[in-house]
Image (tube, rainbow, N blue to C red):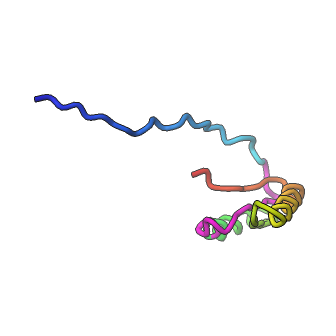
Amino acid sequence: MRLTILDPTAPPPIVETDPGPDAGPLAGKRVGFRSDHTWRSFEWVLDVWAPRFEAAGATVDRWVSGNRVGTEGEVTFAALHDFAERVDLAVVGLGN
C-alpha cells in the first residue's frame, strides 16, 4: 500500500531583505519609537534599546499611537504627523 501525504501549508512569502538606507551616525539625531497598546512587550524592547541610542548620542522620542477611527482617529493621525516631523528616523516595529 502506498500513501500520499498532502501538505496544506502555503509557501513562505518572498521577503525583501534590504534594510533600507543607513541612518549614519546617531549623535545629534532624534530617534523616534512608535508603539501602541496592543503589543506591550515592545515596550520592554524599547526600554533596552532607548539607552543604547542615547549612549550613541541620540535623543529618544517615544510616541504611542491611539485610536484610528472617528474623532480619536483624527487626533491620532495629527499626532503621528507631528511625530514624523520631529524625528530624524523612527523604529516603528520589529518586523516580525
Quadrant in the picture for the N terminus: top left
| Residue at horizontal 61 percent and vertical 65 percent from the top | 39
| Residue at horizontal 75 percent and vertical 67 percent from the top | 64
| Residue at horizontal 64 percent and vertical 69 percent from the top | 43
State the count of labels: 0
Q: Can residue 28 be seen?
A: no
Q: Nearer the viewer, residue 34 or 46?
A: 34
Task: Residue 95 in the image: state x and y as whole percent.
Answer: 61, 50
Task: Residue 66 in the image: state x and y as whole percent.
Answer: 76, 66
- Span colored in magenta: 24-43
The answer to whether residue 96 is magenta is no
Q: Residue furthest front?
A: 70
Q: Nearer the viewer, residue 40 or 56?
A: 40
Q: Residue furthest top?
A: 2
In the displayed structure, 22 sits above or below 47; it is above
In the displayed structure, 85 sits above or below 47; it is above
The answer to whether residue 28 is magenta is yes
Dividing the picture into quadrants, the one containing residue 77 is bottom right
Q: Can residue 93 be seen?
A: yes
Dividing the picture into quadrants, the one containing residue 56 is bottom right
| Residue at horizontal 45 percent and vertical 35 percent from the top | 11
Task: Residue 67 in the image: state x and y as whole percent.
Answer: 75, 65
Report whether 84 appears left or right of 2: right
Report whether 77 appears left or right of 52: right
Dividing the picture into quadrants, the one containing residue 91 is bottom right
Q: Nearer the viewer, residue 91 or 56?
A: 91
Q: Nearer the viewer, residue 55 or 79?
A: 79
In the displayed structure, 79 sits above or below 2; it is below
Task: Residue 8 in the image: state x and y as whole percent.
Answer: 37, 38
